[in-house]
Image: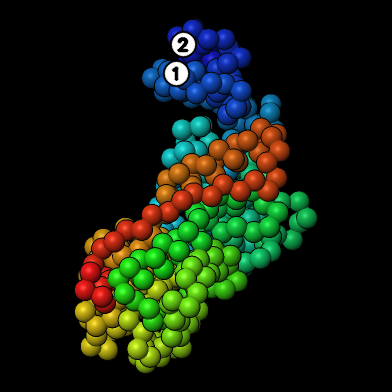
C-alpha cells in the first residue's frame, strides 16, 4: 500500500509538503503541488478519507447546488466545478434544485447530514434555504450574486452593452426584450447593461420577463405575435431565445429574415439550432475553477467574506441576426 512517505521520497519533498498538498492546503507552490498529485496518481495512492475526517474534522467533500440541470448551462458549469475539485482532491456532491425552493432546501439538509466542508451554490431565491442558523460550512456563490457572499460570475453588464453595440452597428434601433426573472441580479444586469448602454438610440418596443427555463409565458407569446415593429428580440438567455425562435416559426416568421434574435450564455445548443444563435459567451470553465479555489481558501481558514470575482464575456456572432442597414 502506497504511503505519504513513498510519495515524498519519489518527488523529493518533505512528508509535510505531501500532506499539505493531499489535504488541499494553499501553502504549497503550484509546481510542487502538481508533481505531488501526479506522483500520487502514478503510484496509485488512495487516501483513507474516513481516517482523515476523524483526524481533521474535514470530509474533503463539497456540495454543489444548482437550480436546474435541464438547462444545458448548468451541467457544463457542474463539469467545470467537478473537474477543478477533483484535481485538488475534493469530492463534489451535486444537488439539482429542479427549480423548486423546497427541493433546494432538501438538498441543503442532505449536505448537512453528510457533513460537507462547504457549498458552492447558485441560488433560486433571496434566502438561505435551511432552517438551521448555521449553514453547512462556508458558502461560495456562483453565477448569481447576492450581497454578503463570496461570488464568482460573469460581467453581465458588459454582455448587455456588447449586445447593444452590436444591435446599433447592424441598424436595430427598435427591440423587444424577453428579460430573465427580475428577482435575480444576473438577469437584471443583463437587461440593464443593454437598456442603459445607449439611452435614446435604442427604443424598447416592449418587454416581458420570462423564467430562465425558457418556457414562454402567455404574455411573452402574445408579445412575439404582436411584435410592434421590433426588428430584434433580445432574450435573457439562450433557452429563452431558442423558445422564441420556435414560437416565431410557428407564426410563419423566419429568423433572421423577418426578425432577428439574440441570446446569452452560449450553451452548446446555440451552434446546432437553426439558425445558429448569436449570443454572449460566458467563460464557464474559469468561473467553475475559481469558485472551487475560493471554496478551498475558505475551508483552509482564509477570510474572503464578500470577495467578488467577475469575468469578462464575449460576443459570438452567428446567423440569427440580420443587418438592417445594409452592412
Identified at 70% across, 45% down, the residue is 305
Relative to 297, 93 lies left or right? left
Q: Secondary structure at mark 2?
A: helix
In the image, 17: left or right of 45?
Answer: right
Residue at image position (78%, 55%) is 133
Q: Position of residue 6 (x, y in %)?
A: 49, 10
Tell me the tag on residue 11: 2
Given residues 171 and 6, the one toward you in this image is 171
Cα separation between marks 2 and 1: 7 Å
Residue 254 horizontal side relative to residue 242, left or right? left
Crowd class of label 2 (few under 14; some 14 to 19; many from 20; radius 10 Å)? some
Instruction: Determine contact: label 2, label 1, CB under 8 Å.
Output: yes
x%, y% of residue 218? Answer: 44, 88
Q: Position of residue 263 (x, y in %)?
A: 37, 67
Is residue 40 in sight in this rendering?
Answer: no
Please give the residue where the numbered disc 1 appears in the rendered image.
35
Image quarter of the C terminus: bottom left
Helix or strand or loop: what does disc 1 sit on?
helix
Question: Residue at left 69%, top 34%?
Answer: 302
Location of residue 224 by image quarter: bottom left
Note whether 200 is above or below 55 in the view shown.
below
Amino acid at each position: 500500500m502506497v504511503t505519504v512517505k513513498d510519495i515524498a521520497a519519489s518527488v523529493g519533498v518533505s512528508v509535510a509538503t505531501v500532506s499539505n498538498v493531499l489535504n488541499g492546503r494553499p501553502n504549497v507552490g503550484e509546481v510542487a503541488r502538481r508533481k505531488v498529485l501526479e506522483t500520487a496518481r502514478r503510484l496509485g495512492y488512495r487516501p483513507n478519507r474516513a481516517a482523515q475526517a476523524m483526524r481533521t474534522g474535514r470530509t474533503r467533500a463539497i456540495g454543489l447546488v444548482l437550480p436546474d440541470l435541464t438547462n444545458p448551462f448548468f451541467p457544463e458549469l457542474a463539469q467545470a466545478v467537478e473537474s477543478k475539485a477533483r484535481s485538488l482532491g475534493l469530492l463534489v456532491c451535486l444537488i439539482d434544485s429542479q427549480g423548486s425552493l423546497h427541493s433546494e432546501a432538501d438538498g441543503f439538509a442532505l449536505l448537512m447530514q453528510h457533513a460537507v466542508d462547504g457549498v458552492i451554490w447558485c441560488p433560486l431565491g433571496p434566502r438561505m434555504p435551511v432552517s438551521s442558523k448555521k449553514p453547512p460550512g462556508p458558502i461560495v456563490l456562483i453565477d448569481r450574486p447576492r450581497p454578503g457572499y463570496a461570488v464568482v460570475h460573469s460581467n453581465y453588464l458588459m454582455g448587455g452593452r456588447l449586445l447593444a453595440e452590436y444591435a446599433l452597428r447592424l441598424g436595430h434601433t427598435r427591440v423587444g426584450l424577453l428579460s430573465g426573472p427580475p428577482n435575480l441580479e444576473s438577469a437584471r444586469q443583463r437587461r440593464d447593461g443593454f437598456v442603459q448602454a445607449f439611452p435614446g438610440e435604442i427604443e424598447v418596443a416592449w418587454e416581458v420577463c420570462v423564467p430562465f427555463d425558457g418556457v414562454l409565458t402567455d404574455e411573452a407569446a402574445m408579445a412575439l405575435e404582436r411584435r410592434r415593429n421590433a426588428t430584434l428580440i433580445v432574450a435573457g438567455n439562450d433557452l429563452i431565445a431558442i423558445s422564441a425562435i420556435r414560437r416565431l416559426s410557428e407564426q410563419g416568421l423566419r429568423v433572421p429574415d423577418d426578425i432577428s434574435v439574440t441570446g446569452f450564455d452560449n450553451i452548446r445548443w446555440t451552434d446546432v439550432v437553426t439558425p445558429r444563435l448569436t449570443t454572449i459567451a460566458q467563460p464557464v470553465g474559469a468561473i467553475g475553477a475559481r469558485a472551487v479555489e475560493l471554496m478551498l481558501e475558505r475551508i483552509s481558514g482564509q477570510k474572503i467574506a464578500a470577495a467578488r470575482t467577475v469575468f469578462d464575456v464575449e460576443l459570438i456572432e452567428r446567423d440569427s441576426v440580420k443587418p438592417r442597414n445594409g452592412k
